[in-house]
Image (cartoon, rainbow, N blue to C red):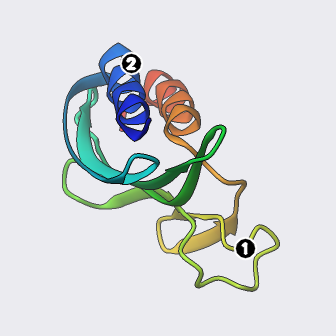
Amino acid sequence: MIEDYFSEIESMLIASPIVLSFKSSKEEISEDRGWIKGSAIFTNGTRMHLFEYVKIDDLPRIIKYEYHWQRKDGKLIKRWDNAPHHKELETYPDHVHVGESVYPHKNMNLKRVLDILEEEIRAYSL
Protein backbone atom coordinates (compact mmCIF):
# COMPACT_ATOMS: atom_id res chain seq x y z
CA MET A 1 0.00 0.00 0.00
CA ILE A 2 2.63 2.58 0.99
CA GLU A 3 4.87 1.36 -1.84
CA ASP A 4 2.07 2.22 -4.29
CA TYR A 5 2.00 5.75 -2.91
CA PHE A 6 5.77 6.09 -3.25
CA SER A 7 5.49 4.94 -6.87
CA GLU A 8 2.84 7.62 -7.52
CA ILE A 9 5.14 10.31 -6.11
CA GLU A 10 8.04 9.19 -8.29
CA SER A 11 5.76 8.98 -11.34
CA MET A 12 4.62 12.59 -10.80
CA LEU A 13 8.23 13.73 -10.75
CA ILE A 14 9.09 11.72 -13.88
CA ALA A 15 6.05 13.08 -15.75
CA SER A 16 6.55 16.72 -14.81
CA PRO A 17 7.77 18.83 -17.74
CA ILE A 18 9.85 21.03 -15.40
CA VAL A 19 11.81 18.22 -13.68
CA LEU A 20 15.22 17.53 -15.22
CA SER A 21 16.24 14.96 -12.63
CA PHE A 22 15.38 13.76 -9.16
CA LYS A 23 16.58 11.36 -6.54
CA SER A 24 14.63 9.96 -3.65
CA SER A 25 14.89 7.66 -0.69
CA LYS A 26 12.03 6.12 1.18
CA GLU A 27 11.30 3.91 4.13
CA GLU A 28 8.33 1.64 4.59
CA ILE A 29 7.71 1.69 8.33
CA SER A 30 4.72 -0.60 7.99
CA GLU A 31 2.40 -1.63 5.17
CA ASP A 32 0.40 1.58 5.65
CA ARG A 33 3.05 4.08 6.89
CA GLY A 34 6.28 5.47 5.59
CA TRP A 35 8.30 8.46 4.50
CA ILE A 36 9.80 9.65 1.27
CA LYS A 37 12.37 12.38 0.85
CA GLY A 38 14.31 13.60 -2.10
CA SER A 39 15.35 16.42 -4.33
CA ALA A 40 14.49 17.51 -7.85
CA ILE A 41 16.36 19.80 -10.21
CA PHE A 42 14.15 21.90 -12.47
CA THR A 43 14.60 23.13 -16.03
CA ASN A 44 15.54 26.64 -14.84
CA GLY A 45 18.24 25.31 -12.49
CA THR A 46 16.27 25.74 -9.27
CA ARG A 47 15.94 22.81 -6.90
CA MET A 48 13.31 21.42 -4.55
CA HIS A 49 13.90 19.29 -1.48
CA LEU A 50 10.85 17.34 -0.38
CA PHE A 51 9.78 15.26 2.58
CA GLU A 52 6.49 13.50 3.30
CA TYR A 53 5.50 11.21 6.14
CA VAL A 54 2.37 9.39 5.02
CA LYS A 55 -0.26 7.08 6.50
CA ILE A 56 -2.56 5.13 4.23
CA ASP A 57 -6.11 4.79 5.54
CA ASP A 58 -8.72 4.53 2.80
CA LEU A 59 -6.72 7.29 1.09
CA PRO A 60 -3.18 8.55 1.66
CA ARG A 61 -2.94 11.08 4.50
CA ILE A 62 0.16 13.25 4.60
CA ILE A 63 0.94 13.67 8.28
CA LYS A 64 4.09 15.77 7.90
CA TYR A 65 5.41 17.53 4.82
CA GLU A 66 8.01 19.99 3.61
CA TYR A 67 8.60 21.21 0.05
CA HIS A 68 11.61 23.54 -0.03
CA TRP A 69 12.17 25.36 -3.34
CA GLN A 70 15.47 27.19 -3.71
CA ARG A 71 17.60 29.05 -6.25
CA LYS A 72 20.83 27.68 -7.71
CA ASP A 73 22.79 29.52 -5.01
CA GLY A 74 20.74 27.84 -2.25
CA LYS A 75 18.65 30.91 -1.38
CA LEU A 76 15.08 30.03 -0.37
CA ILE A 77 12.34 30.93 -2.83
CA LYS A 78 9.42 29.23 -1.04
CA ARG A 79 8.92 26.46 1.49
CA TRP A 80 5.56 24.92 2.24
CA ASP A 81 5.39 22.90 5.44
CA ASN A 82 3.24 21.96 8.39
CA ALA A 83 5.77 22.20 11.21
CA PRO A 84 3.74 23.34 14.25
CA HIS A 85 5.58 26.58 15.00
CA HIS A 86 3.35 29.38 13.67
CA LYS A 87 0.28 29.18 15.92
CA GLU A 88 -0.65 32.77 15.05
CA LEU A 89 -1.65 31.78 11.49
CA GLU A 90 -5.26 30.86 10.73
CA THR A 91 -4.09 27.87 8.67
CA TYR A 92 -1.93 26.51 11.52
CA PRO A 93 0.03 24.29 11.23
CA ASP A 94 0.10 24.72 7.43
CA HIS A 95 2.03 27.72 6.09
CA VAL A 96 4.44 28.95 3.43
CA HIS A 97 7.77 30.70 3.83
CA VAL A 98 8.55 33.26 1.12
CA GLY A 99 12.04 34.56 1.68
CA GLU A 100 12.15 35.67 5.32
CA SER A 101 8.35 36.01 5.65
CA VAL A 102 5.75 33.42 6.69
CA TYR A 103 2.16 33.38 5.42
CA PRO A 104 -0.95 31.26 5.97
CA HIS A 105 -1.43 28.59 3.33
CA LYS A 106 -3.69 25.59 2.83
CA ASN A 107 -2.18 22.16 3.32
CA MET A 108 -0.07 20.98 0.41
CA ASN A 109 0.90 17.86 -1.44
CA LEU A 110 3.40 17.23 -4.22
CA LYS A 111 0.86 17.59 -7.02
CA ARG A 112 -0.21 21.06 -5.83
CA VAL A 113 3.41 22.15 -5.41
CA LEU A 114 4.37 20.91 -8.89
CA ASP A 115 1.36 22.70 -10.40
CA ILE A 116 2.46 25.97 -8.76
CA LEU A 117 6.08 25.53 -9.76
CA GLU A 118 5.22 24.62 -13.36
CA GLU A 119 3.28 27.86 -13.66
CA GLU A 120 5.95 29.98 -11.96
CA ILE A 121 8.89 28.46 -13.83
CA ARG A 122 7.15 28.88 -17.17
CA ALA A 123 6.18 32.48 -16.37
CA TYR A 124 9.43 33.73 -14.88
CA SER A 125 13.10 33.16 -15.32
CA LEU A 126 14.62 32.89 -11.87
Of callouts 1 and 2, which one flags the residue occurring earlier in the amino acid sequence?
A: 2
Q: Tell whether 50 sits left or right of 64.
A: left
* Residue placed most toward the observer, 40 or 123: 40
Left or right of residue 16: residue 78:
right
Q: Is residue 68 visible?
A: no
**Number of numbered labels in the structure image:** 2
Q: Determine the residue located farthest toward the front in the rendered image.
A: 31
Amino acid under label 1? Answer: Tyr
Quick one: 101 or 1, which is closer to the camera?
A: 1
Disc 1 and disc 2 in contact, CB within 8 angstroms: no
Which image quarter is the N terminus in? top left
Counting from the top left corner in percent of width and height, residue 65 is at 48, 58
In the shown orientation, is residue 60 left or right of residue 73?
right
* Label 1: element kind: loop
Q: Amino acid at mark 2?
A: Ser
Residue 54 appears at what percent x and percent y? 48, 52
- Asked if residue 33 shows in the view, the reply is yes
Q: Residue at x 29, y 51 (%)?
A: 37
Q: Is residue 82 above or below residue 50?
A: below
Q: Quadrant of the C terminus?
A: top left
Vertical placement of 2 versus 65: above or below?
Answer: above
Q: Quadrant of residue 56?
A: top right
Distance CA(mark 1)–CA(mark 2): 29 Å
Identify the residue under disc 1: 92
Badge 2: residue crowd in 10 Å (few <14, some 14–19, many ≥20): some
Identify residue for label 2.
16
In the drawing, what numbered circle is on residue 24? Answer: none
Q: Position of residue 47 (x, y in %)?
A: 27, 43
Residue under the point 64% across and 38% down: 59
Check disc 2 and report its element: helix, strand or loop. loop
